[in-house]
């Protein structure tokens, strides 16, 4: 989906089309009605806090504002950009709509998150361009939004291709297109080559995918190890044999929050306790929605010096009970030495398993406690 969250907001506020719009922040106010009945929107320069950008329109991206950027930095780059609060309920609704629309055309999909899917088209006899247009039309009819589609022999090339002509793009790639359309791109465009690997490759004077494909295997092995070196050469040549995964269970569920100000573990104990309880309830609700229970509860703490500490505890039973999650989290906290103020608190539960009707805590009980 193209700038998905921002595009959903533009359906609600069509007068903002063509303008730099940023969605995100913490406690971002909703637009207000002006004296003449028109809507008055907040500006990014007015934001104060530690929130991050959830998404931005392509106009805002042209000014250097991208997802996960700190809001204060974004405000320096685009002070006059419109600022909107995130509405995740709306985004989940539109996510469901676009995926259901795709299913009417191609019933075999791999869900890759709220705004992205892979689709198996091997059983379709239509020309790729026709099939791509059908997919785009189905999504547009169901949501009013545009998406970018890439059709290729594998997931690797489709992932890269879907970004080549955004927004509203349709890209068709074959292996014959790799030298002209894939190799000139920077190595960072390959999903799985992160910032650290990119920097190391650049230190070896490997900047493009073409240079990576032509790099000596021995050189890559020395700097990356045998397994990763083999993978680098394989993907640089456009090879990817990963199948679609149409069903999967989450490995863990987590929630975290960055505080507006650094909190003292003693003086701000009440605020920290309330935050801990809220995060545990959110994790519990997430478990319930996914119909799973978890055995290992973990905490994540980031201090004002950016040092990050984690602790976890494995229970003798699987649970989705917020009270039990809170108790386990508090046991984890007892194993932490607090010498600085807290910047971030997170709760995570793993070792997940499908809900069993014989479990001691029922999901209906959890829902009653939460709501």
Image: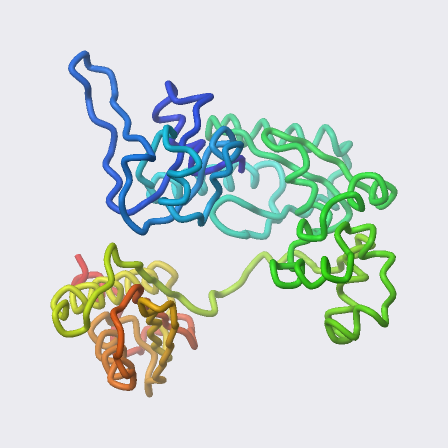
Query: Residue 131, how many percent across, how many down?
Result: 70, 32
Residue in the foreground of this view, choosing between 231 and 131:
231
Above or below, 32 against 219 in this view is above
Residue 150 position by quadrant: top right
Relative to residue 48, is residue 71 drawn left or right? Answer: right
Residue 196 position by quadrant: bottom right
Residue in the foreground of this view, choosing between 123 and 211:
211
Give the mark count.
0
Query: Residue 46, how many percent across, how many down?
Result: 27, 35
Relative to residue 142, is residue 172 drawn left or right? Answer: right
Which residue is the extreme one toward the top?
36
Residue 176 position by quadrant: top right
* Residue positioned 20% across, 14% down in the render: 37
Above or below, 104 against 11 in this view is below
Colouring convention used in this rendered image of the protein: rainbow
Residue in the foreground of this view, choosing between 30 and 63:
63
Query: Residue 105, how many percent across, how many down?
Result: 61, 36
Above or below, 296 against 343 in this view is below
* Residue positioned 33% across, 83% down in the render: 317
> The C terminus lies in which quarter of the figure?
bottom left
């Amino acid at each position: 989906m193209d700038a998905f969250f921002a595009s959903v907001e533009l359906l609600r506020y069509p007068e903002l089309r063509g303008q730099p719009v940023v969605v995100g922040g913490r406690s971002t106010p909703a637009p207000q009605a002006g004296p003449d009945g028109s809507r008055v929107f907040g500006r990014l320069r007015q934001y104060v806090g530690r929130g991050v950008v959830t998404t931005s329109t392509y106009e805002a991206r042209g000014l250097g504002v991208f997802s996960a950027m700190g809001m204060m930095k974004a405000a320096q780059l685009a002070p006059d950009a419109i600022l909107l609060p995130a509405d995740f309920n709306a985004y989940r609704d539109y996510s469901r709509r676009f995926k259901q629309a795709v299913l009417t055309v191609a019933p075999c999909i791999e869900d890759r998150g709220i705004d992205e899917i892979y689709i198996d088209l091997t059983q379709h006899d239509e020309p790729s361009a026709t099939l791509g247009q059908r997919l785009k039309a189905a999504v547009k009819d169901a949501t009013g939004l545009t998406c970018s589609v890439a059709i290729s022999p594998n997931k690797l090339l489709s992932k890269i291709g879907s970004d080549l002509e955004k927004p509203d793009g349709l890209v068709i790639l074959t292996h014959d297109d790799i030298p002209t359309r894939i190799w000139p791109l920077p190595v960072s465009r390959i999903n799985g080559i992160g910032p650290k690997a990119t920097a190391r490759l650049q230190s070896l004077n490997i900047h493009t995918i073409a240079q990576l494909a032509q790099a000596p295997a021995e050189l890559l092995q020395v700097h990356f190890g045998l397994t990763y070196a083999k993978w680098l050469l394989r993907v640089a040549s456009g090879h990817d044999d990963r199948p679609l995964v149409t069903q999967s269970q989450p490995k863990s569920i987590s929630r975290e929050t960055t505080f507006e100000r650094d909190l003292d573990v003693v003086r701000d104990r009440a605020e920290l306790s309330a935050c801990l309880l809220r995060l545990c309830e959110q994790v519990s609700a997430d478990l319930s929605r996914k119909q799973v229970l978890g055995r290992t509860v973990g905490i994540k703490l980031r201090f004002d010096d950016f040092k990050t500490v984690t602790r976890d505890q494995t229970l003798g039973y699987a649970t989705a009970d917020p009270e039990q999650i809170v108790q386990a989290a508090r046991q984890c906290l007892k194993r932490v030495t607090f010498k600085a103020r807290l910047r971030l608190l997170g709760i995570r539960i793993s070792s997940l398993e499908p809900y069993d009707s014989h479990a001691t805590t029922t999901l209906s009980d959890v829902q009653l406690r939460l709501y």
